[in-house]
Amino acid sequence: MPSSLNPKLETMLAETSNKICGCKGIRSCRLCKNTENEVQALFTGNHNVQSNVEKKTCYFCVHCKKAYQYTRVDSLAEDQSLQSSFPECQNEDLPNNTSVPSPGATSNVLELKEDNKLCQHKNVLHKMNFPGITIIENFVSPDEEFSLDAAIKETPFQKSQSGRQKQDFGPKVNFKKQKIRVSSFNGLPSYSRFLFERMGAHSCLKDFQPVELCNLEYCSERGAHIDPHFDDAWLWGERLVTLNLMSDSCLTFTLDEDPFLEVRVPLLRRSLIVVSAEARYQWKHGISEADVIGRRVAMTFRELSEEFSRGGSKEEEGKHLLTLALTFQGTAIQPSNVPHWD
Ligand SMILES: O=C(O)CCC(=O)C(=O)O
Ligand SMILES: [Fe+2]
């Protein structure tokens, strides 16, 4: 809120916002932003001014794992699917042996080798490497997606920041003070066991052992999104693994030092994305409001950092967390205790 507003109005807005959504501090969603904007406009006559500086947008190709800026991007405005804003690469002739089939998969174009020569892109202005992204398409089948969503809905969601709703299965963490409490953590939920087992069949996740699952629900009516951020690196390890359910979306990567550059990575429905390396540690990631169409559910699994793994100073704590997590008998932890990057 601008400081030019009178204190009474600020208090009124804060109270209203608190009642209708879960935003705190600088975060906002459509519910509190609308209220705030309407009242602000009444009092100040100000309206948001859109920046007209051109963005350099690169699109990540799931197949050759490079990011491309195009001379023109045909956007099918009438098609509501986000997929249509990603230019297609010509990869129909890819041999089957370049892929690793996923147990839930119907597609055989998966985990393709980097630098796949057969992947061709038209109208390319600029091509860049974008290390640290692996996408496994069709990680779950439509039936499995439906069952997972039904199982998730059995637990009530808690209001979160920026219009999101969440459920957390993990230890209580105070990231600022670097403190953990495990007393209320009783494991990952049973419905996530088969996902963990399936991950192990993929080379990039062979040794992946999750200690936290955070389910996030995004709905466009609430203007749900997630601001650009880094995930914690003290407790959480290198790989952030997200299963995307119920609709397509897009993860946008940005750099503070180059605010006009962005890399858009498709979050395809039923696909699994692994974010690691530079994509995890050098680039911030976020999901903009415009990239949420209808309802989206994201299941994010996190592993332990080196400090909490074998040989690290917190190895014993890590072991304990892992034993609890992998019982798969978990129930969601209480909202006030929810650990999160923000
Ligand atoms: O919804 C997503 O896919 C990303 C969520 C995320 O970045 C986070 O929870 O830290
Ligand atoms: Fe994140």
Image (cartoon, helix red, strand yellow):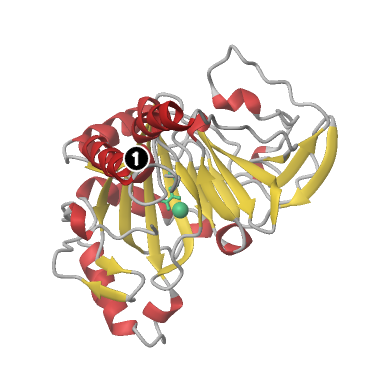
- Tell me where residue 187 sits by quadrant: bottom left
Depth check: 73 or 329 in front? 73
Residue at mark 1: 164
State the count of labels. 1
User: What SS does tag 1 mark?
Assistant: loop
Q: Is mark 1 within 8 Å of ligand 1?
A: yes
As drawn, is 154 to the left or to the right of 196? left
Say which residue appears at 14% left-offset and 64% top-offset.
184
Eyeballing the image, is 276 above or below 13? below
Say which residue appears at 26% left-offset and 61% top-offset.
170
As drawn, is 64 to the left or to the right of 202? right
- Tell me where residue 54 sits by quadrant: top right
Tell me where residue 145 appears, x and y as whole percent: 34, 32
Q: Quadrant of the C terminus?
A: bottom left
- Tell me where residue 62 sits by quadrant: top right
Eyeballing the image, is 37 above or below 283? above
Q: Is residue 300 visible?
A: yes
Q: Residue furthest top?
A: 78
Say which residue appears at 55% left-offset and 32% top-offset.
48
Q: Amino acid at mark 1?
A: Arg
Depth check: 200 or 130 in front? 130
Q: Quadrant of the N terminus?
A: top left
Q: Is residue 141 visible?
A: no
Depth check: 340 or 54 in front? 54
Say which residue appears at 42% left-offset and 73% top-offset.
234
Tell me where residue 266 appears, x and y as whole percent: 57, 37
Tell me where residue 308 appears, x and y as whole percent: 37, 78
